[in-house]
Amino acid sequence: MELQVEKPKSNLFKIYEIISTMASRPSGLIGLTILLFHVVLAVTSPLYAPHDFKAIDPSLMLLPPSSEYWFGTDSLGRDVFTRTILGGRTALTVTFFGSIIALLWGGALGIFCGLVGGRIDDVVMRIIDAFLSIPWILAMLLIVSLLGTSTIVLIPALGFFYGKGIVRVARAATHDVIAKDFIVSARARGHGNLSIIWNEILPNVRDAIMVEGAMRWSWMLLGFSSLSFLGFGVSPPTPDWGLMISNARGLMSFAYWAVLAPIVGLSSLIIGINLTADAFAKALGIDRSTKAPV
Amino acid sequence: MIFLIFKRILLGLITLFIVSLITFAGVEVLPGDACTTYLEREAYGAALEACYQRLGLNVPAYERYLSWAYGVIQGDFGYSLSGEMKINDVLGPRVKNSMVLASASILIGIPIALLLGIITALWRDKFPDIVISTITIFSMTIPEFISATLLILIVAIWLEWLPGIVIVPTGASISELLPNIILPVIAISMIMTAHMARMVRSSVIQVMSSDYVQMAILKGVPYWKMVFKHVLPNALLPAINVVALTIAWLLGGVVVTEVVFNYPGLGRLVIESISNRDLPVVQALAIILASIYVGINLLADLMTLMLNPRLKSLQIKK
Amino acid sequence: MENAVQQINNLSIGFTSKKGEQISILKNITTNIKKGETVGIVGESGSGKSTLALAMMGYVKQGLYTISGECLFHSNDLLRMKDKDLEDIRGRKIAMIPQNAGQSLTPNLKIGYQIDEALKLHTDLKIQDRNKKISELLNKVRLPSPEIMAQRYPHELSGGQQQRVAVAMALAGNPELLLLDEPTTGLDVTTQAHVLELLNFIAKDTGTSMVYVSHDLGAIAQVSDRVIVMYSGQIVLDGPVRRILKNPIHPYTSGLLKSIPKLTLPGLPKSMSGSQPQPGTITKGCSFYDRCELAEMNCSNNSPELEYVKNLNTSVRCFKHKELHEKIDKDENLVTSIENTILDKEMLGLSKVSISYAKKKFIDQLLNKESDDNPTVKDINLNISKGETLALVGESGSGKSTILKSIAGLLKAKEGNIKYENNKILPNELKLRDPNSLRAIQLIFQNPDESLNPNHTVEQIVSQPLKLYFGLQGEKLKDEIIKVLKKVRLGEFYLTRYPRQLSGGEKQRVAVARAFAAKPDVILCDEVTSALDVSVQAAVLNLLQELKKDFGTTYIFVSHDLAVVRAISDRVAVLYQGRLCEIGPSKNVYNFPSHPYTEVLLGAVLEPDPDIKPKLVAEDIVEEKPPEKGCSFQGRCPRKVGEICNSEVPPWQIGENGNAIRCHINIDELRNLQK
C-alpha cells in the first residue's frame, strides 16, 4: 500500500493547519475575521479614540449621529463611538483569562476524577452537580457583590464558576479514553498515574477540553455582560457595552443610537467567538451540538 | 426499576443538601455578618444586639444551620432583613409570576424546537437546514438582555404594537399577567429554543445513520412511516435529559429578562436582595431555584426510565 | 440471460475525495444472479463487497454515488428507480439480512411489530392471519416459543436469536432474492454453524436466490453454489464453489486460501506479503501487482480484464491464469509445523485461581452481605513451561481473556495465586508487583486501533517500555527502537508515523514490537489476529513464531479461532463458562477430543472446503451465567448422564494421550462414544 509519508510537524505548523481548516468554511472564516477585528480593536483603540470617553458635557446630551460624533452622544454628552470602540476591552480581557483559568482547573479536576473514579469521583461530582444547580446569575451576583468587581476578583471568579462544566466534559472524555487498550497496556507495564495522565490521556482529551474552553468563552462573555448590564460588573465611567446598554435603555425612544452601537459591538463579538469555537470544534473533529449549555 | 427511581430521588436530595451547605457556608465566610452589613454605621450596641437576637446569630454556626434547615424542610425560610417580613410572603407571589413566565416559554419553546430540529435534520445541508441553522446560531448567542432590549425598541417603540414594560402588581392573577408576557417569553425562549433545536437535529441525524434505519429502508418502509416509527422515538429519548438541562439553564435568563421588562417575578427580587445584602432571602432563592433545577432533571430522568424499553424490561425481569 | 434474477452490468460506484478526485469503490462489476442459486461474494475489508450487496437493493450509502453501469432486477434498473417504486421491491422482492442484527433491529419496537410491519407492507394478509404468520416465521427460523418471542424487544434476545429474527423478517415478504451481509460474523462458533445450517435449509425449502457476502471462506464454502472473489473493488474470480476453493486460478485467491490455518492441515500457513491497496491509490496496472508472486512487467502497466475460461466455467482477472492452473497441484510445503524448544522450567503457574467481575450491589453493601459465590472464572490450575505456547480457547464468556488480565495483574484474583519463575508468588494487584516481574510479562491486544495511542508516533509508542524499564534516553533509545522495529520488519522511516497512517498488519507489528522491547519472558496474546484480515493474519502468526524462536519467549495465546490455535500452540486448554474442560497437547486435543464440549466446539468449525460439513452436536443455547453447582457444561451437554452432572463438579481424569478432562463419563468411554 502506498502511504503518504508525513514529516513530523512542528506545533506551529499544526496550529497553522487547524486555523486554515477553520477558515476553509464560510462560517469559520466569518468567525475568525470578527474575532480578529475585535482583538485588534481592543488592543489599538486607545490610540485613535477620537474623544475622551469620560468627558461629560450636558450641552452635548443625546446628539444624533453626525460627522463629529459618528454614533451620536449619550445622556451625559459622551461620544458613543469612542465608548463603543473602547467598550470591549475589559470584557475581552476578563473573559479570555477567565476561560483559560476555567480550562485549566476544570480540565485538571475532570481528568483526575475520570481516572481515579470510585468514592472521590462520586463526592466531587455531587459537589459539581450542586454548583450546577445554582443558577449562574445568582451565583455570579453573589460572588461579585461579596468580593467586589475588580478584574483581580472577576477573572478567577468567572474562571471558577464556568470551569465546573468543563470538569464534566473532561471527565467524560477521560472515561472514553481509559477504557481503551492503550491505557490498559500502559497500566499493565506499570506506569504511574501521573505518567499515564501526561503521556496517554492528555494528548487524547486535550482537543475536547480546548473546544469546551472556547465555548465557555462565549458563555462567559454572555454572563459577564449580563452582570454589567445589571450594574454588577465594570464600574462607571469605564466604558463597557453591557453597562452602556443598561444606561441608554431608558432613553431608547429618543436616542436609539446610544443603545444600538454597544448592542452591535457585543453581539458581533459573541457571535464571532461562537462561530470560531464551532469551527475550531469541527476542525478538531468534535461534535458539540448534543451538549447542553451548562 | 423502583430501586432506580429511589436512587435518582436520593441523589437529587443529596444535591440539594450540598446546595444548602454551599449557600450557608458562602454566607458564613463573608467578612462581617448579616447584621453589621445590614445596619452599616449603626452596627453597635443595643441595635446590633437586638439584630443578633432577632436573627439568632449568637449561637454556633452549625446550630443555626440546623434550625434554618429544619425550617426550610417545613417550607419556612424565616424572615428577611429589610422588610422584617416573612420570606415566604415575599417570595410566594413572585415565584408564581416567574413560573408563569418560565412555563409559557417552555411550552412554546419545546414544540418549536422539536419542529425545527426535525426539519433541519431531515433536510440536512439543504435549503431549510441552512436557513434555520444560521438563525439558531444567532439566536443562541445573543444574550437575553440584548434581545429583550431590541424587542422593546422595535416592537414597542418603533412599531408600537405592544407595551414595552410590564405594568402589573406583584399579586396579579395569571389572566392579568398573560397579555403582558408576550415579549418576555419571546426573549427568554429564543436562546433555549435554538439550543434544543440543535440538539434534536444532531440526535435525529445520528439515528438516521444507524444500522436499524438503513434496515428499515431496505425493508421497504415508506419514508414518513420510518421517520415516525423508527427514527423519532429513538432520537428524542436521549434528547429529554439534555432538554432538561437547557430548561434549568433558562432560569438565569428569566432573571435578566424580568429586570429588562420590569416584570414582577423573582428577577428584581434577586437584584434587590443582593444589593441590600439581604442574605436570608438570597439563601431562600438559591434553594428554591436549585430545587427547580433538580426537580426538572429528576423528572427527565424518570421520563427516560419510563420510556426506554431497555429499562422497562428490567422491571419485568425483577 | 433468461433465468437471471439480477443482472449487474459494468457497475462502478465511488465518491469524490476532498481534493475533488473521483475515487471508485466498485470498478466495472459485471455479473448475474440466477434463479435458485446461492452466490458467495468473498473479500477482505475494503474490497467493496458490502457496497455491491447494497447496490443490489438499489441502495447507495450517503456520500457514494453511481458512476456508471446498471443493476437490473428483472430488467428494471434499481439504481435509477424512484424511491416510491423501490419501496415496493425492497422487502417484497429483494430482502436483506444485515451483518449485525443487534444494531439493525429498531430498539424501541417489539420483535413481533417489526415482523408485522414487513408483512403489512408486503402481503395482503388480515390481522389474524398476520399473527399466525409471525408465529410461523419465528418457528421456521427455529426460535423457541414464538408467541413470547414476538412480545420481546430486540435487546432481550441473544446475538444468535437476533440474527434469526432478522432472517424471519427477511422471509416475511417471500422474496425472490435474499441478500446476506456477513450474517454470521460476530457470532460464536457453534451459533454460527447453526445459523448457516438454517440458511441452507431455507434456500432449499423456499428456492430463493441468495447472495452471501462474507470475508470468511469457511462460511462461504458451506452455503454457496458459486463464489465471486473481490479484490480492491473488482471481481477477480467468479466460478463454481469447488473450482474456486479447491483449484483457484487467481493468485490472490490461491494466496488467500494458503494463508488460512486449517484443522485438517496443522501448522503455520504461508503468509501473503503486503495488504490490500486503499481505494484510489492504484492508477494503472493490476491492483494485485504489489503482492503477486507471479507478477511481471506487463502486470504493472496493463490491467487485466475479466476473462471467461470456458472449460472451467470460471471468469478470472489475471494474465497468468493458465500458468496457475497447470501449477496448482504441484505446490507443496503449504505449512511449516512449529517446533518449540520447551525447557523443563516452570515459567508461570496458576493454582486454584478464581476471578469475579461482580461488584457488590448497593443493597448488599447496605446489608453487608457477600453477594457473589459464583465467580466468573473458577478453580483454574495451569502450569506453563519456559518456551511453551499454551492456548486458551472457548467461546465468548468462557473467561479466557479474564484469565489473561489477572495474570497481567489488571484484574484481582479473588482466590488462588499466580506463581512466576521458581515459585515466586506474584501479588494479585498491579501496584504491588516489582518492576522486574512487570517487565517480564507483556500483553498484546486484539485490536491495534485501540491498543496504540492515536496521538503518539511509532517512535513514542515503542519508546515507552524502553524508557520505563531500562531508562534509555537520547541516541541509545533511538538505536534500540530502530533495532526493535527491525525485528518486526518495519524500517526506520516508520518512526515518525502515527498509527492512523499504518495498515492493520503494520499496526499489529508495532504492538508486537512494543511488547518485545521490554525483553519479556512471557507474552500474553489476547486474540491478536482476530481484528486482522485473513491474508495479514498469517504474516503476524509467522512473525510471532519467529520472534519466539529467537528469544525463547513463552506465549499464552487466547483465541476463539480453533484453527489458528491449532497452528500455533503446543498445548491447549478448553474453557467453558470460566471453568476448564479439557487440557492437553494440541495434537491430542484436536485429534482425539474427549470432553463433550471440545467435541461440540471442534465439530462446529467451518473449513474453507465445501466437502467438509460441520457437525452440529449440541443446541446453541446462550448461557449468561455459569451454573451454580455441578458441571459447567450441564446446560448444553449432548452426553449428559443425569442428576450427577447438575450437582457435582466432575473430577479430573487423565487419558492415555495425555489429555486431562473434567467429566463424569469415563474418558475411554467418551472416546468410544464419539467414534
Image (tube, helix red, strand yellow):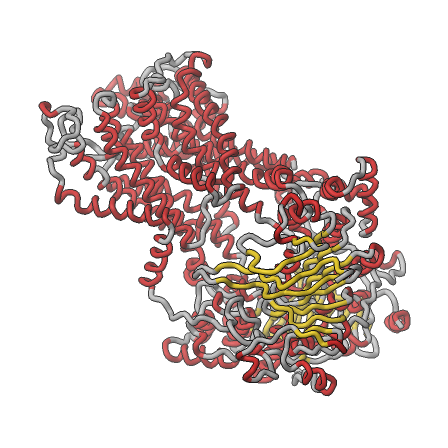
- Visible residue check, residue C555: yes
Q: Which of B220 and A228 is in front in this view?
A: B220
- Image position of A203 (left or right of C141): left
Q: Where is residue A237 in the image (x, y as percent from the top left)?
A: 17, 32
Q: In this view, does C629 lie above or below A247?
A: below
Looking at the picture, how far across and down is residue C397, in whole percent?
A: 70, 59
Question: Eyeballing the image, is C639 above or below C361?
Answer: below
* In-image side of C473 versus C584 (left or right): left
Above or below B2: residue C672: below
B107 displayed left or right of B61: right
Residue C346 visible here: no
Image x and y of residue A194, in percent: 42, 60
Residue C378 found in image quarter: bottom right
Residue at 47% over, 68% down: C501
> Is residue A90 shown left or right of residue A212?
left
Quadrant containing the N terminus of chain C is: bottom right
Camera-side residue of C70 and B85: C70
Q: How many labels does the image show?
A: 0
The quadrant where residue C47 appears = bottom right
Say which quadrant the C terminus of chain C sits in. Answer: bottom right
**Front-most of residues C150 and B161:** B161
User: What is the x, y in percent for residue C491?
Assistant: 47, 79
